[in-house]
Amino acid sequence: MSKDIPLQKYGFVKRDTPRKINLDPLQTGGILTPEANQALMEWGDGYSVCDYCAGILDEIKTPPIFDFIHKALPEFLGCDQARVTNGAREAKFAIMHSICKEGDWVVMDGNAHYSSLVAAERSRLNVKLVEKTPSPEYRIDPEGYGKAIEEIKESTGNVPSMALVTYPDGSYGNLPDVKAISRIVHSYGVPLLVNGAYAIGRMPFNAKDLGADFIAGSGHKSMASCGPIGVLGVSNEYAPKVLERSKFNKNKEIESLGCTARGATIMTMIASFPSVYERTKPENWQKEIENARWFSSELENMGMRQLGDRPHNHDLMFFETPVFYEISKKADRYFLYRELKSRSIHGIKPGLTKFFKLSTFGVGRENLGMVVDAFKEIIQKYEA
Amino acid sequence: MSKDIPLQKYGFVKRDTPRKINLDPLQTGGILTPEANQALMEWGDGYSVCDYCAGILDEIKTPPIFDFIHKALPEFLGCDQARVTNGAREAKFAIMHSICKEGDWVVMDGNAHYSSLVAAERSRLNVKLVEKTPSPEYRIDPEGYGKAIEEIKESTGNVPSMALVTYPDGSYGNLPDVKAISRIVHSYGVPLLVNGAYAIGRMPFNAKDLGADFIAGSGHKSMASCGPIGVLGVSNEYAPKVLERSKFNKNKEIESLGCTARGATIMTMIASFPSVYERTKPENWQKEIENARWFSSELENMGMRQLGDRPHNHDLMFFETPVFYEISKKADRYFLYRELKSRSIHGIKPGLTKFFKLSTFGVGRENLGMVVDAFKEIIQKYEA
Ligand SMILES: Cc1ncc(COP(=O)(O)O)c(C=O)c1O
Ligand SMILES: Cc1ncc(COP(=O)(O)O)c(C=O)c1O
């Protein structure tokens, strides 16, 4: 073994970004609850949950993984069967890989996350995107799914083997009409996968009400969990394929390679679950929407423009910010990042000034007010 | 949303198994270092490492993920390219799925872990096992690979697209002659995947020295990391296929679905790395082997029998224990588990008395002596 590795660089590394206020869409829903932090300390060791495992991770009774996966999660998600995965993308891949055959087609919304496209690519599928409407709305017209299916049928003789919709998408926070999409794709016999990475754990969500055959959620994005972890939901109709067991080992599901969240990650999801359940109640989500709308209107009063659904129905928002772009021409493109960082406001990507996305989830009206004030101060300072 | 979920069951759950001494083969190499525990607290939040990500997880400079994955890991593993995955099985699947085509054949040792078989099954490959020698040795004869390849060639007209060897296997802790296996499979043009889940992070390991084209390791099993996390190594020859980028997004590798250890898991691996590096040095590993051999001989003096390689070369050992089995007929099959638990000795599966496997890794001579004394006491107590 070589002696050339400079070991002093590794070991414990501090996380030094100030983040008293965090607006990073990737992070607002994944901040751990105190219970999840406690669970991490308790269950951090490798394979900690495997002590009482008789071969099937989701059937472990102590800790209560069985009840969580077979009772709480299906009820919470409104689906027949649920599993934990290593993330939303891993759930999407498992679903596509088990349901579709190499060379099949899948239809997705034009706002689909790259990980949906890559999951299809890894499954060796062809992808057709349903166009979004032009700026500033970027909406997905449900009829677009019918059109896309017809086109695939015409050129290949077959309907696609799956449709996917992103609810909401990760750029604009738009909530498409999933029920209408479901009705349309089902009329062609095409099953629907709802990517709820930004919904499940933040807002009310029910797979059956939406008409979803499959759902994917993200624990580290929206369920206050230490990742990588996600959830997969499937209807009884498709469960035999998605959850098929190995011919080599009757305890092990093929698509999960036997076990997924084999350690602390599942315990953090369980630890945060009561809080996550609470925050997704309609009355609590309503407050989040009100905060988002208030924040959006404050920014618009300063000359910025919120794209996507208006009025907005989600905490993830995309803003066009010409006022900051003009300043960046005089200052430099990192001025906004620096100014916010000095105020301990985190989450707008360094270097972005012309437009940016952010999330108001869980930030609270008081802190959002501080962000609004910070924006005002910064504009005044540089326009002076 | 239903109100039927009994939330009080979830939240923080204590881990109450006494484990002052832990012999669980799954766990001995995955116990977190103090640095890894600290890293967990610091980086637990979802997507915590993504702050300075420009789109490629393994190129993040702060924290030093780029240096770790592109410099330290390849050097440590003796391979050209390395990546982190969600575990050893996920690494094996990524390698098989990218290198082999549906319907291809793969040859594996008869001691292969179920997750290697399931990875092949998920890749829709045919598996041929190289027989192990009968009890008590369970050895893998390198010539068996040549025979298996010839048979596949004869019946299909083609050589298999991959060979896999488990080094060491997870049942007996046997270390097969990988160099000889590599020479044989390479003479047929077949590339070799070494599953080092129980080697990498415990003992000296060098992919090139072994003649491996691909390697898989497990962070939560053997690298003192909070899982799920693993490592994948690949030679420059095969890297373009295994690490191929998406046509939809030039930053994202297909087999990783874009990102794998997107959070605390990678930071715990980095935190433990200096210790892991240290413990795998030949002189430290030699002490582990001596402890294992000493422990084995003590148990044999009590009438138990260690199967597999003798003298043994790894901390994972399988024992036939007729003395406990005889007692279980008078007492019950949980007596051993209860007796050990009351002494805070953890890791032998509840209910096993006829044979069991255990690991002496990192337990230390003093604690191993306490286990030996405990076994003696238990035998005396029940034989009285
Ligand atoms: C809409 C959307 N779906 C899926 C994902 C991926 O989630 P995960 O990391 O759980 O795979 C993201 C991540 O940014 C996303 O924005
Ligand atoms: C020999 C062997 N390989 C692979 C694995 C799986 O490791 P991971 O959990 O990292 O996928 C195990 C787990 O027990 C094992 O014993």
Image: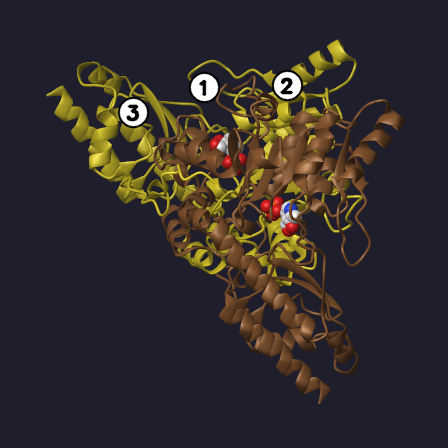
Chain colours: A yellow, B brown
Name which of mark 1 and mark 3 comes first in the sequence.
Answer: 1
Residue B219 in percent (x, y) is at: 53, 46
Quadrant housing residue B370? bottom right
Element type at mark 3: helix
Q: Which mark is residue A137?
A: 1
Q: Amino acid at mark 3?
A: Glu
Residue B317 sits above or below residue B157 on the image: below
Queried on whether the Cβ of the residue with tag 3 lies below 8 angstroms from ligand 1, the answer reads no
Queried on whether the Cβ of the residue with tag 2 lies below 8 angstroms from ligand 1, the answer reads no
Q: Amino acid at mark 2?
A: Val
The residue to which callout 3 is attached is A300
Q: Is residue A209 visible?
A: no
Q: Are marks 1 and 3 in contact (CB under 8 Å)?
A: no
Element type at mark 1: loop
How packed mark 2 is, by other alpha carbons closer than 10 Å (few <14, some 14-19, many 20 or more), is some
Q: Which label sits in the foreground, 2 or 1?
A: 2
Name which of mark 3 and mark 2 comes first in the sequence.
Answer: 2
- Real-space CA distance between mark 1 and mark 3, rounded to the nearest whole angstrom: 16 Å
| Residue drawn 55% across the image and 18% down it | B248
- Real-space CA distance between mark 2 and mark 1, rounded to the nearest whole angstrom: 23 Å
Q: Amino acid at mark 1?
A: Glu
The residue to which callout 2 is attached is A127
Residue A177 in percent (x, y) is at: 57, 28
Residue furthest out toward the bottom: B384
